Image (cartoon, rainbow, N blue to C red):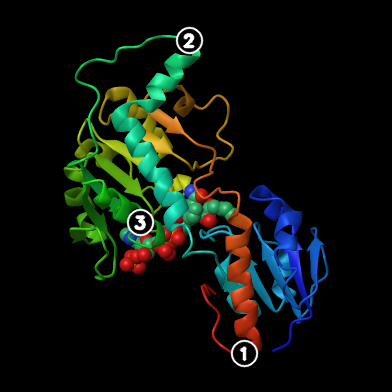
Amino acid sequence: ETLDRLCIHGSVENKFPTESFRAAFDDLDLPTEVVGDGESLGPTDAVASFRPRPEFHDAAWVHCIRAGYDEFDTASYEAAGVPLTNSTGIHDTTVGEMAIGYMLSLARLLHVYRDRQVERDWYAPPYERPFTVENERLCVIGLGTIGEGIARRADALGMEVVGIRRSDESVPGVSERYHPDDLHDAIGDARFVAVTVPHTPETEGLLAGPEFEVMRDDAYVINVARGPIVDDDALVSALESGDIAGAALDVFAEEPLPEDHPLWGFEEVIISPHRGSATNRYHLDIADLVKENVRRIRDGEPLRNRVA
Ligand code: NDP
Ligand code: 7N6
């Protein structure tokens, strides 16, 4: 197949400078162009975008610059016969380190000391509060790229790592695997529960009231996947009632998290602004995925990360 143009939709600016991303294709022998909404696209145009757009259904191929493509309607791409690819397979280190950072902070109280530093307060926490992550149990829900990235690193820190996935493949660093039907068994003894599944009809509201009741009251929830997988209202109630001890959240049902949202107000909740994957070379990692698929299209090979 032939491609005459690679279009970069302006919505990529949500995650990195559009121009840096465009420049990452300077070594590709394919003209690149930054396009806005309503650009007319044809059967020799490829598109890379953060957001879906109706006009993408006229393109040769669409690449979603996110691993989570839940905002893209896969059925509509299938109906239009336009292949859609996503950006999974590259977030093991970035999001893996982020999750380890959350756990170390929650155990060693870095977030609390930093809050107190703002007040120049030489703060002494309750003696019972600090702990080490070593020997603590972590349950990773979703053993894909990110789940494995977290599991390997947690294992290296001496944590006991268990996980949940539908398929039966083993994962380095994970000592025990559970089926999604056994969610409550898997999370019941965990000090940390990390959510790393895609947002799908099956995973929406996966962690809600009953799960917070099953969890230890000294447990922490980590969500680096998508907001709606954890029921916000139930999480706030569980934090208020002491059903769980705290949380670290990179993703929210509504982003940016509204200023008046109760989750902002908890000392034991760490909030990051959906930057789990952010690094100063993130645009290059995504560009590599796009270039690989340009090569495959030209060589007539199946696309990497094809999701529709
Ligand atoms: P992967 O596709 O590599 O991994 C997802 C894993 O989840 C799969 O291995 C799958 O394993 C498992 N899974 C799917 N459904 C279920 C289920 N119902 N119960 C249990 N396990 C399930 O994706 P990534 O690891 O790259 O990314 C995961 C998600 O994280 C993305 O979809 C995205 O929403 C989010 N994300 C967030 C980022 C951030 O900035 N915070 C950055 C990147 C991604 P199996 O098939 O065996 O069940
Ligand atoms: C950065 C988005 C994903 O799904 O939401 C994340 O990849 C990060 C482009």
Q: Earlier in the sequence, mark 3 or mark 2?
A: 2
**What is the x, y in percent for residue 216?**
20, 35
**For the point 23% across and 62% down, which residue is it?**
179
Q: Left of 22 or right of it: where is 253? A: left
Position of 123 relative to 155 (above/below): above
Residue, disc 1: 299
Instruction: Name the quadrant where ligand 1 sits.
Output: bottom left
Q: Is residue 92 above or below residue 84?
A: above
Q: Is mark 3 within 8 Å of ligand 1?
A: yes
Amino acid on which disc 3 is placed: Gly
* Residue 119 marker: 2
Q: Earlier in the sequence, mark 2 or mark 1?
A: 2
- The answer to whether residue 45 is visible is yes
Type of amino acid at the residue the image marks with label 2: Glu
Q: Are marks 2 and 1 in contact (CB under 8 Å)?
A: no
User: Which of the 4 image quadrants contains residue 134?
Assistant: top left
